[in-house]
Image (spheres, rainbow, N blue to C red):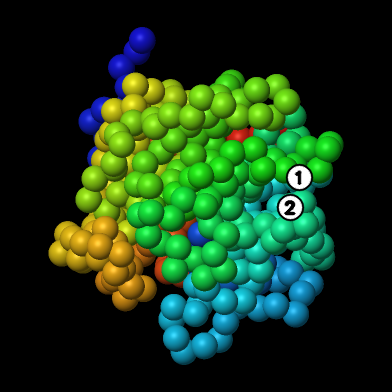
Amino acid sequence: MRSNPIDSFKVKVSDLKFIGRNLQRPECILAEPDGTLWAADARGGVTKILPDGTQQTMTQSSDLRFSKSDDLASRFTQGTLPNGLAFAENGDILISNFGTDLLEVMTRDGKTRTLYDNIEGKPVGKVNFVLRDSKNRIWITISTKTKNWAAAFRPETNDGYIAIVDKDGIRAVAEGFRFTNEIRFDAKEEYLYIAETTGRRISRMRVHPDGTLSDREVFGPPDLGPGGFPDGIAFDSYGNLWGTLIYGEKIFALTPEGEPRIILDDGKPEAIARLESNFFSGRVTFDDMLACASSAAPWMASVTFGGPDLKTVYIGTLKGNRIPYFTSPIAGLPMVHWKKR
């Protein structure tokens, strides 16, 4: 096998460039082949950013908007909070709404409808991420069934789960995760990789033709180390799984063998140590989380490969108002919407 392109690859904060302005909680970013970006926006929709920097915010056709409270914590727990994004087969935008607990779909001019608000008559829970596979099935992660997600940010809480939407409707296919966050398929869609934020690990499960999952195992280290709370993940074309540590303020990667690499580190060691101490003792507060935020890419939440060669890495953040990016030595794994256009 050829040498791994990321073995000696490091990014410094000074290497980062930026696109976008005045964004609100651009947690998830979708990239199109022509260079257009779509970022989740807490004003209740998405912001479209063209390659020349021109941008337009499209809010959902809904009365719900982001919280205007002076309490910063409420801005991340109340109102509509578009979180994960995926393109539907027709180009509409699938939205996992972390504030309304709904799986939604929005046309590119803002018309929105709810796809699912329950599973077998029960509330869905905190819908975090949405992903479409090559069979046009929709996969969603639910971080917790607790309404206030911050109350579930504990090491012992394991009520996260994964659901699938196919021709038979919506159903849960795996459960017992510690704050289920982003998920990704490998190149052949043989395994589904799962970021467990409060589990501080990446898990994976074998994917069967009928959409069932089995053979759950930890991929990589059982604990991702200081600040090891994974949020977003994405594969490159070599097979490395890239990801963000949201409170560690790091971009990491796991090689195909599961070996960890740190690509970017903008963490605050003292704040991270305090957060971890309080997390493991069950006393973590929102202030502990806030104290970890860096200045360049505060609360790193996702990585998206884009650009014409898929070598531009965009960083989604929860507290930033613009999108940092840098150049990777290897292209990302094309997503379903990229392959078909």
Q: Which residue is mark 2?
A: 119
Most distant residue in the left direction: 270
Q: Nearer the observer, disc 1 or disc 2?
A: 2
Q: Which mark is residue 143?
A: none
Quadrant showing the C terminus:
top right
**Residue under the point 66% across and 29% down:** 212
Quadrant showing the N terminus:
top left
**Residue 142 relative to residue 87: left or right:** left
Expressed as whole percent of the image width and height from the top left, the position of residue 239 reads 44, 25
Expressed as whole percent of the image width and height from the top left, the position of residue 88 reads 75, 45
**Residue 33 relative to residue 295: left or right:** right
Give the amino acid at mark 2.
Answer: Ile
**Residue under the point 30% across and 56% down:** 249
**Residue 273 relative to residue 326: left or right:** left
Q: Is residue 198 visible to the viewer in this orientation of the structure?
A: yes
Above or below 150: residue 18: above
Q: Do the residues bearing badges 1 and 2 touch, measured as CB atoms within 8 Å? A: yes
Q: In what element is the residue under mark 2?
A: strand
Q: Which mark is residue 170?
A: 1
Give the amino acid at mark 1.
Answer: Ile
In the figure, residue 188 lies in which quadrant? top right
